[in-house]
Image (cartoon, rainbow, N blue to C red):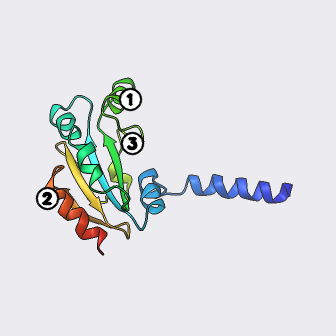
Amino acid sequence: MKRFFLLSLFFVILTSFKTGNNPFDTFVAQNKGKVILVDFWASWCKPCREELKKLPKFKKKFDGKDVVYVYISMDIEDAKWKKAIEEEGLTEDTHFLNYPIKGSEVLKGQSVGAIPRYMIIDKKGKLVNADAPHYGKDLAKEIEKYLAE
């Protein structure tokens, strides 16, 4: 038993330093079979915060469906970021702070020059729309299309 524990610990240590071991890619792998909507935003971004006001109504359209929401913030200050998550009612979703997307295989070749910005990852874990529409009918149609695949 002790030997098994030591071997397991050694494996965890080795794999956690492996190149390409990216937390976002791990998140995507854990959610294969679901459509992932990626929302790039920041607590200081007024247009981002306005878009987030539309989110509760938007999410209702996909209740019970295989849609996962992940928020990647461009914030620098941890406290402001956490406060904005609370204010916007996003505490139940997945968040990454100041996330370097260049290390992600899924988001390889992408850059985010302006926010808010949305991306869609299909059920296979592939980025299928790197510049998706804002919350509304057009984005809902896009998500429905990938849910149907």
Circle nearer the N terminus (2, 3):
3
Give me the residue at 30% from left, 57% from top: 62
Q: Is residue 110 visible?
A: no
Q: CA distance from mark 2 to mark 1?
A: 29 Å
Please give the residue where the numbered disc 3 appears in the rendered image: 96
Q: Nearer the viewer, mark 2 or mark 3?
A: 2
Q: CA distance from mark 3 to mark 1?
A: 11 Å
Give me the residue at 46% from left, 62% from top: 29
Circle nearer the N terminus (3, 1):
1
Q: Tags 2 and 3 in contact by the CB under 8 Å rule?
A: no
Quadrant location of the C terminus in the rendered image: bottom left
Residue 60: x percent and y percent? 29, 51
Q: Residues within 10 Å of mark 1 (few under 14, many from 20)?
A: some
Residue 131: x percent and y percent? 18, 56
Please give the residue where the numbered disc 2 appears in the rendered image: 138
Q: Is residue 60 above or below residue 96?
A: below
Which mark, by number, is residue 68? Answer: none
Q: CA distance from mark 2 to mark 3?
A: 25 Å
The quarter holding residue 6 reads: bottom right
Circle nearer the N terminus (2, 1):
1
Which mark, by number, is residue 82? Answer: 1
Label 1 is placed on what type of residue? Lys
Q: Is residue 96 above or below residue 88?
A: below
Q: Classify residue 89 as left or right of residue 10.
A: left
Q: Classify residue 38 as left or right of residue 20.
A: left
Q: Is residue 125 above or below residue 98?
A: below
Of residue 67 and residue 120, the one placed in the foreground of this image is: 67
Label 3 is placed on what type of residue? Phe
Of residue 28 and residue 21, the one placed in the foreground of this image is: 28
Q: Secondary structure at mark 1?
A: helix
Q: Tags 2 and 1 in contact by the CB under 8 Å rule?
A: no
Q: Residues within 10 Å of mark 3 (few under 14, many from 20)?
A: some
